């Protein structure tokens, strides 16, 4: 893989998809339909998927592509693949809360090694460079030319007072019970893959997810966090979270900055 080309294409396509998403987001109204699993899908999901899929297939025709809108179980046989959530946080989008992202990641042998997370309503873009290190670029963006990209990294956590981030739409009692195992300085909620990015920038120390997610929900944020010095492990045994699983379903997991004294369930 040409990682410089990959970085450039992921950035450009994420921004182009974000432009289309914001065009629909800022309209007076938009249609919302339900998929077979009862999850919502909008015109923005489908338009962003079309933009990213077309671009990635043109740039990397020999690499397997998986997207939320075009997942196919035959792709599980590939050890290397691109995985996309064209609009992560559809519920946040529908309720116009702004916490939605465009996610694109590249996975090799079960590990997401490159990724981009773009939050168009918040003007924040997080991306791994050709060497796998993560930077943040802030608006305004030129789709063709990268602006100033500031390297980011996790902070050294204080286990006597941790900063916690948890799901905005899925913060249930099981999540609260787990958070209560820690000494918490402050806790905040965020939507979509932004939670990984808040750990990556040091705005949070730990993000526990006790609930259902899919690989396209997490791969890009996982790559961004790894590139900033963080990690993501399974909730049950603290082994690395892997990709290419049956049905693309994730187990519960914990994203964190090294130094956090991880608790068992």
Image (cartoon, rainbow, N blue to C red):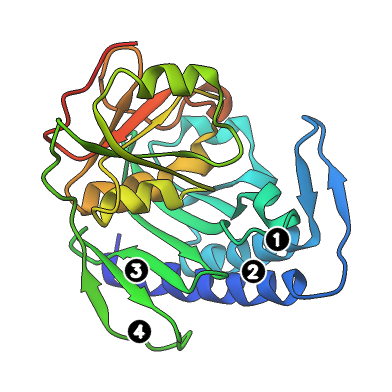
Left or right: residue 34 versus residue 255 is right
Report which residue position mark 4 lands on.
146
Q: Are marks 1 and 3 in contact (CB under 8 Å)?
A: no
Residue farthest to the front? 185
Report which residue position mark 3 lands on.
7
Distance in Å between CA atoms under marks 4 and 3? 10 Å
Q: Position of residue 236 (x, y in %)?
A: 34, 12
Distance in Å between CA atoms under marks 1 and 3? 29 Å
Disc with the residue nearer the chain's start (2 vs 1): 2
Report which residue position mark 1 lands on.
96
> For the residues carrying marks 2 and 1, which lies nearer the camera in this image?
1
Disc with the residue nearer the chain's start (2 vs 3): 3
Disc with the residue nearer the chain's start (4 vs 1): 1
- Please give the name of the residue rendered at 52% of the width and 42% of the height, measured from the top-left corner: 217
Distance in Å between CA atoms under marks 2 and 1? 22 Å
Q: Position of residue 61 (x, y in %)?
A: 50, 61
Disc with the residue nearer the chain's start (1 vs 3): 3
- Please give the name of the residue rendered at 69% of the width and 57% of the height, measured from the top-left corner: 93
Q: Secondary structure at mark 2?
A: helix
The answer to which image quadrant residue 17 occupies is bottom right
Which quadrant of the rendered structure holds the N terminus?
bottom left
> For the residues carrying marks 4 and 3, which lies nearer the camera in this image?
4
Q: Secondary structure at mark 4?
A: loop
Q: Position of residue 208 (x, y in %)?
A: 38, 30
> For the residues carrying marks 1 and 3, which lies nearer the camera in this image?
1
Report which residue position mark 2 lands on.
51
Which quadrant of the rendered structure holds the C terminus?
top left
Q: Is residue 168 above or below residue 234?
A: below
């Amino acid at each position: 893989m040409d990682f410089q080309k990959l970085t450039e294409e992921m950035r450009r396509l994420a921004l182009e998809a974000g432009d289309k998403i914001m065009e629909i987001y800022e309209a007076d109204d938009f249609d919302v339909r339900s998929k077979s699993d009862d999850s919502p899908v909008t015109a923005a999901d489908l338009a962003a998927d079309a933009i990213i899929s077309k671009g990635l297939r043109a740039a990397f025709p020999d690499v397997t592509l998986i997207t939320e809108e075009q997942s196919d179980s035959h792709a599980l046989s590939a050890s290397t693949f691109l995985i996309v959530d064209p609009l992560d946080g559809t519920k946040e989008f529908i309720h116009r809360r702004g916490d939605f992202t465009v996610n694109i990641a590249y996975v090799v042998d079960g590990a997401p090694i490159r990724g981009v997370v773009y939050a168009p309503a918040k003007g924040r873009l997080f991306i791994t460079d050709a060497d796998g290190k993560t930077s943040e670029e802030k608006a305004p963006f030129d789709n063709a030319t990268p602006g100033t990209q500031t390297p980011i990294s996790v902070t050294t956590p204080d286990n006597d007072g941790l900063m916690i981030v948890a799901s905005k739409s899925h913060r249930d009692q099981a999540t609260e019970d787990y958070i209560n195992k820690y000494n918490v300085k402050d806790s905040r909620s965020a939507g979509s893959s932004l939670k990984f990015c808040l750990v990556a920038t040091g705005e949070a120390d730990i993000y526990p997810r006790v609930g259902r997610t899919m690989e396209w929900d997490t791969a890009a944020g996982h790559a961004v966090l790894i590139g900033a010095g963080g990690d993501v492990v399974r909730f049950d045994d603290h082994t690395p979270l892997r990709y290419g699983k049956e049905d693309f379903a994730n187990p519960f997991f914990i994203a964190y900055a090294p130094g956090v004294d991880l608790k068992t369930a």
